[in-house]
Image (tube, rainbow, N blue to C red):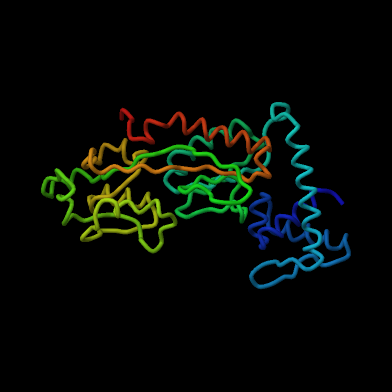
Amino acid sequence: MDWDGLRFFLELARSGTLVTAARRLAVDHTTVARRIQALEKQMGTTLFAREAGGHRLTEAGRRLQPQVEAMERAFQAVESTAPASQEGLSGLVRVGATEGFGTLVLAPRLAAFARQHPSLVIDLLAMPRLLHLSRREADIVISLERPARGPVVVRKLTDYSLHLYASKDYLASQPAIENREDLRGHTFISYVDDLLFSKELQYLDELLRPDSFALRSTSILAQHQATLSGAGIAVLPAFIAGGDARLVRILPEQASFTRTFWMSVSAETRHLARMQATWNFICETVEGQQPSLMGNAST
């Protein structure tokens, strides 16, 4: 019984579905099903109960899981002793991040990083929702709130700034905005309140309650596009809107916000060469992007 077969069992036990386990293992879901069937035949017992919503561990499966997890820890300890420079980085690293940061800051740079390591696969989950290490949705998570609990390694990745922006066409059709009170009566673009995935996105509560909205969206990229169309005023991250010459920053001294990105990784996998390298690369990337993140870029 080899470790390669048991890791299929472990991923299915943790994810509960063939599709999710397959995605984590970078194989087809039929491969996962076939390997599980072979393992059950080898062990002479059923490890999973097949249900409409996925796969649930049987009693035999529950007894096996902690033993396989111990094997996983031993394998990871051996893997961590092998210098990455000997054969290069390999395997899968799944990075979860907020939509705008993941798309505009991380995507082009992580792609270049992966090209340097042909055996390394980077999955970037740039999504307008919170991703969970505990559910194994990602290996490294960049979030707006610091994880409060769990066996994780956490560091403050960076602060970033947000400001009020509107298109030149919108401002040309409206009375001049010289102070916060002048914002009343204007149309805004913002998030959908009851679908906010973090309290850190409640910017307008610190400023005013808008009289009307042209568009509300769960997507910060959609908000950016709506602002460009001249639909109204929006609070946008400087790394999205700061370098966009089509937009004008409004009340730069009176309406600015600062938020923080936190980066976390499971304590169990932090020592793996591919995790360490990806973690360090993200830190270096963010360090090099400080001017645009804080709205101090020259462009």
Q: Position of residue 231 (x, y in %)?
A: 23, 53
Most extreme residue toward the left is 175
Quarter of the rendering containing residue 36: bottom right
- How many discs mark residues in the rendered view? 0
- The residue shown at (65%, 73%) is 52
**Quick check: 95 above or below 282?**
below
- The residue shown at (56%, 42%) is 154
Most extreme residue toward the front is 148
Q: Position of residue 216 (x, y in %)?
A: 32, 59
Q: Position of residue 198 (x, y in %)?
A: 43, 54
Tell me the quadrant of the picture where the C terminus can be found. top left
Which of the pair 273/267 is nearer the observer?
267
**Quick check: 25 above or below 111?**
below
Which of the pair 160/231 is nearer the observer?
160
Q: Relative to residue 128, is residue 175 drawn left or right? A: left
Q: Relative to residue 238, is residue 61 drawn left or right? A: right
**Quick check: 100 above or below 10?**
above
- The residue shown at (56%, 44%) is 264
- The residue shown at (45%, 47%) is 144
Q: Position of residue 280 (x, y in %)?
A: 57, 32
Q: Relative to residue 113, is residue 274 drawn left or right? A: right
Q: Relative to residue 130, is residue 266 drawn left or right? A: right
**Quick check: 168 above or below 297?**
below
